[in-house]
Amino acid sequence: MDANTFKPFSQLKRMMLIINPVSGRRISLRFLPDIIRIFTANDYVVSVFPTGKRGDATEFARLYSSEFDIVVTIGGDGTLNEVITGMILGGSHTPLGYIPSGSTNDFASCQGISSDMLTAAMHIANGSPRQIDIGKFGDNYFSYVSAFGAFSWLSYTTSQNLKNVLGHSAYILDAVKDLPKLKSYHLKFTDGEFNYEGDYIFGAVCNSTSVAGTFTLPTDLVDTADGKFEVLLVHKPQSLIDWQSILTGVFTQDYSSPFLDLFQTEKLRIEAPAHLDWSLDGERGHGKSLIDFEILPKRITLIS
């Protein structure tokens, strides 16, 4: 390439690339040189920040994201959650790109982001911005789901090695192994207009068409920039027939079953057992007896 084809450094865009090298099947490192090549060919100067432990991505984003023209993260939904949390804590409004390399990638599925890492990189390099809502769970944040109960624990209890080898199938195997964990919890949900109270085996406050790598919500219902949550609750079944009603409703998106509640809200207060843990974008979130959910409308600018 002729040297005259290179732009002056002052005309190049600055990219912060945060990568979790162990997510998914550890394939991100294999594609990293090609990903950087795609970005440099599109006039980016790329600074790579590899994570070494949980919390690194949050600190990187909190401290430095405002200094760049774009932040791109490579990893799973948990890594993305850390980056978004760090950007919010640091007051950053820098545009964000996401290259999924995790085992389930619910967020990417909902947002139409390619599962092919090089394609996702090219879409970021040549993409356009759109704004998305972010949820707040007490003092924590989530990009697409906060869930409790049946199957919600799988993303943080399934071993990383098993996920690396088997991918999404690892969650199914772990679910079968842990069926005894399917117990109910008594909770009360108040959205300012209606109250929902009962014994539930699963609940999700979400902003996504894909929930916990298991359930899907109707695409005509979910708008990730409408300032509203979708709330899905599964009541405790009393018999195998009840189980059949629940599973049929969930997997056919027919929520008329008396064991399923689905509604939208802008805010939510939940009274729950203090010991009940939640999954925030696949990462463990410690519960409280009183939890306030709120939505941050169009808080993140996503490039895709």
Image: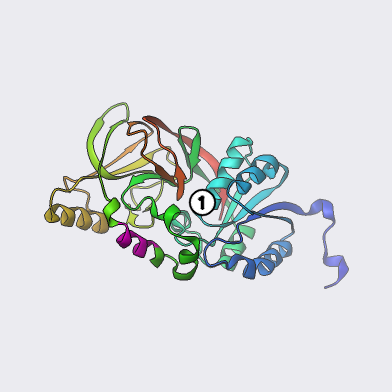
The residue where tag 1 is placed is: 78
Residue range highlighted in magenta: 171-178
Residue drawn at point x = 45 percent, y = 41 percent? 285
Instruction: State whether residue 166 is above or below residue 230.
Output: below
**199 with respect to 113 (left or right):** left
Q: Residue furthest right?
A: 3
Image quadrant in which the C terminus is located = bottom right
10 Å neighbourhood of mark 1: few (<14), some, or many (≥20)?
A: many
- Main structural element of the magenta stretch: helix, strand or loop? helix
Which quadrant would residue 46 be assigned to in this image?
Answer: bottom right
**83 with respect to 246 (left or right):** right
From the top left corner, tell me how far across and down residue 36 is, in percent: 69, 64
**29 with respect to 196 (left or right):** right
Which quadrant would residue 232 be assigned to in this image?
Answer: top left
Residue drawn at point x = 34 percent, y = 57 percent? 214
Instruction: State whether residue 88 is above or below residue 24.
Output: above
From the top left corner, tell me how far across and down residue 235 is, in percent: 22, 44
Work out whether residue 281 can be spotted: no
Work out whether residue 165 can be spotted: yes
Instruction: State whether residue 87 is above or below residue 160.
Output: above
From the top left corner, tell me how far across and down residue 72 is, in percent: 63, 54
Q: Is residue 145 magenta?
A: no
Q: Is residue 173 magenta?
A: yes
Instruction: State whether residue 91 is above or below residue 61.
Output: above
Q: Residue furthest top?
A: 192
Residue drawn at point x = 74 percent, y = 52 percent? 13
Mark 1 lies on a secondary structure that is helix
Image quadrant in which the N terminus is located = bottom right
Q: Amino acid at mark 1?
A: Gly
From the top left corner, tell me how far across and down residue 43 is, in percent: 74, 59
Q: How many marks?
A: 1
Residue nearest the viewer, comparing 146 with 95: 146
